Amino acid sequence: MALEPELFDALIDTVRRFVAERLRPLEAEVEAADAIPEAIVEEMKALGLFGLSIAEEHGGLGLTMAEECRVAIELGRTTPAFRSAFGTNVGIGSQGLVIAGTPEQKAHWLPKIARGAIITSFALTEPDVGSDSGAVKTRAVRDGDVYRLRGTKRYITNADKAQLFTVMARTGEEAGGRGVSAFLVPRDLPGVSIGEPEKKMGQKGARVADVIFDDVAVPAENRLGEEGEGFRIAMQVLDRGRLHIAAVCVGVAERLLADCVAYASERKQFGKPIAEHQLIQAMLADSKTEALAARALVLETAAAKDSGANTTMEAAAAKYFASEMVGRVADRAVQIFGGAGYIADYGIERLYRDVRLFRIYEGTSQIQQLIIARETLKRGG
Ligand SMILES: Cc1cc2nc3c(=O)[nH]c(=O)nc-3n(C[C@H](O)[C@H](O)[C@H](O)COP(=O)(O)OP(=O)(O)OC[C@H]3O[C@@H](n4cnc5c(N)ncnc54)[C@H](O)[C@@H]3O)c2cc1C
């Protein structure tokens, strides 16, 4: 259910001010420390950011997809690592539970996730299993009241802080996604261990690590949905997650545009602000046009999802277009800033590195192309 319009406007206003006044001043510090200050995480909890997408009955804000995308656009106006602090709780870490959890599973976990009392992560990728995600090798073998879980998950966002993982593991002999089931795996079960956080190109402050399951006894009641439904659940989670990521891309593009306009209006060459040179204007026009197109695609798809439509194709198109778009906008931003665009103090080179990830996780651009083509062929156009 949508929030009352005045309440939603107040939320957007609060998030906008939080981003401008609390998060943006900390961007360089987060980059240097590769960590989000704990005090900021506490402020995020107080604002309800960990529970944006979780129903009010479970302690969240219960936003619609369109509302969540509007908030994600606002959060995109700062270093994307801030959003990642609660991004898995709002998105891929919690949505399997929201989509397929039993009333008992939801009542047990969702209130803690919504208020940020625990962090939750989504564990699909493995050392040998990336884009072909239906090929998971992690195994869960039924043994009385438990499943014995063995395998390694790779590049798992927030793994170092997570207390709960949604894990996709093979339970059946069927090939591909049909043999995969989903499980809620608490971090404190014996046999769960976390690797060292990886060194990354960008998005410093958001950490990824391996999660290793060494003969972990997972209670059978922690299975999400029926055996064999795990891959379908994961794909539904990603349908939603991709739209959220696309919205973040729109926000980062809008931030970069604002930075470019401010810099180009100030910086003078050949006796006038560079903003008065038409070749600079052409770059601004291209970035603005693409950002507007991505925003429209994201919000239209979110509204269609809220109305119950199947938006698998549109969400893939939004993620594909918006993530590629923000890469081009970031590249033009470096160009508009000239040498300063390459120098860390201005923050543009940081965002240039940060946005590169959007074309890779939650399905690479090539995987989005395959989904768009498959769905378009299925729909006949
Ligand atoms: C920072 C970060 C955070 C992440 N967070 C998570 C997380 O929280 N949970 C999680 O489960 N995973 C996570 N991932 C994993 C991410 O989703 C995968 O890296 C991504 O899906 C790509 O898989 P891969 O890296 O194995 O690349 P590969 O699948 O090996 O792909 C390599 C290249 O081949 C291309 N390719 C593959 N198949 C095809 C095809 N059929 N046709 C054309 N081209 C193809 C790809 O597009 C890519 O260009 C994260 C990754 C990173 C880097």
Image (cartoon, grey):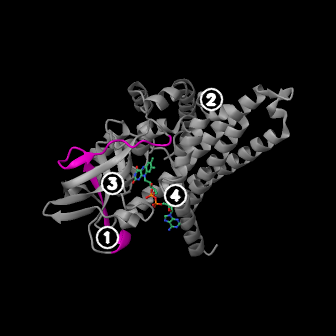
Q: What residue type is labelled 1?
A: Gly
Q: Is residue 238 above or below residue 48?
A: below
Relative to 212, is 50 on the left or the right? right
Q: Any atom of ligand 1 within 8 Å of the CB at mark 3?
A: yes
- Residue at label 3? 153
Number of numbered discs on residues: 4
Q: Any atom of ligand 1 within 8 Å of the CB at mark 4?
A: yes
Horizontal and vertical percent position of residue 297: 64, 53
Q: What residue type is labelled 3?
A: Lys
Q: Which residue is drawn at 73% across and 37% down?
A: 336
CA neighbours of label 3 inside 10 A, class few (<14), some (14 to 19), many (20+) = many
CA neighbours of label 1 inside 10 A, class few (<14), some (14 to 19), many (20+) = many
Q: What residue type is labelled 2?
A: Tyr
- Residue at label 4? 364
Residue 364 located within the stretch drawn in magenta: no
CA neighbours of label 2 inside 10 A, class few (<14), some (14 to 19), many (20+) = some
- Residue at label 2? 346
Marks 3/4: CA–CA distance = 18 Å
Of the two numbered discs 1 and 3 on the same chain, state the one appearing first in sequence. Answer: 3
Q: Do the residues labelled 1 and 2 touch (CB within 8 Å)?
A: no
What residue span does the magenta drawing correspond to? 175-202
